[in-house]
Amino acid sequence: MDNLNDLRSLWHTANTDRLPGAGEMLRLVKGFRSQKLRNKWLIIVASIVLAGIMVFAMLLGHFELVATYLGGSLMAVACLLLAITNIRSLKRFYQLEDCSNLEFVAFIEKTRQNQQRYYQKTMRAIMLLLAIGWLLYLYEPARAHGGWLYVLYGGILLYLAIMWFYVRPRNFKRNAQKLDQIQAKLEKITEQLK
């Protein structure tokens, strides 16, 4: 009986102020899921629309150089590759309905691994295809206006450098911090339950 009384007194004196409640955890999971699904659908729709615009522009445009068609094709392929990678990851988020804390921690860890793989491999391939496609696609119009060639290519290369060396790493760090915060909250709860 003394053990039961000790356990009861320990249970009542435990400080759980820092731990989120059940309602907050449910709201956290649903908010995370809906935000990720919304972002993925926006990316899918935007990339398919952009790929369609590129194909439409290449079909209706009367270009003299093959480089223009090649550049447009590379940009359309990059947009479709972006859409396909996001479509493949939709299934995981739709399956995330009601889950335990441990399942959500595992889901967050898998999301972190997927994010790392996307950042290191897929995003590089997509940005490389877009950059080469953009440079090839704009060569014909820039060539027609002589002096603008250097200004246009300088601006494009500056933009690509900013996107590659500043925006891309910053975006990755921000997303990684969000996942770390969610995982830290869940691990506190999981440790408390054990």
Image: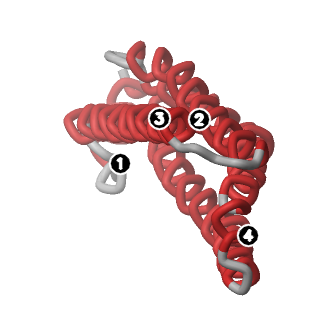
Where is residue 62 drawn, in percent x and y? 58, 44
Q: Earlier in the sequence, mark 4 or mark 1?
A: 1
Badge 3: few (under 14), some or many (20 or more) residues near its Cα, within 10 Å?
few
Distance from Cα at disc 4 to Cα at disc 2: 30 Å
Distance from Cα at disc 4 to Cα at disc 1: 63 Å
Where is residue 35 drawn, in percent x and y? 33, 41
Q: Earlier in the sequence, mark 4 or mark 2?
A: 2
Q: What element carries label 4?
A: helix
The relative height of residue 34 versus residue 17 in the rendered view (above or below) is above
Q: Is mark 1 on a helix, strand or loop?
A: loop
Residue 166 left/right relative to 12: right
Distance from Cα at disc 2 to Cα at disc 3: 19 Å
Q: Which of the two marks, 4 or 1, is nearer to us in this view? A: 4
Q: Name the residue under label 1.
A: 19
What residue appears at the point 33 percent right and 17 percent down from the top-left corner?
Answer: 97
Distance from Cα at disc 3 to Cα at disc 4: 22 Å
Q: Which of marks 1 and 2 is nearer the N terminus?
A: 1
The relative height of residue 53 versus residue 181 in the rendered view (above or below) is above
Q: Residue reaching furthest left?
A: 23
Q: Which of the two marks, 4 or 2, is nearer to us in this view? A: 4
Residue 85 left/right relative to 136: left
Q: In the rendering, which numbered label is found on residue 143?
A: 4
Distance from Cα at disc 3 to Cα at disc 1: 54 Å
Distance from Cα at disc 1 to Cα at disc 2: 38 Å
Q: Which of the two marks, 3 or 1, is nearer to us in this view? A: 3
Badge 2: few (under 14), some or many (20 or more) residues near its Cα, within 10 Å?
many
Q: Name the residue under label 3.
A: 56
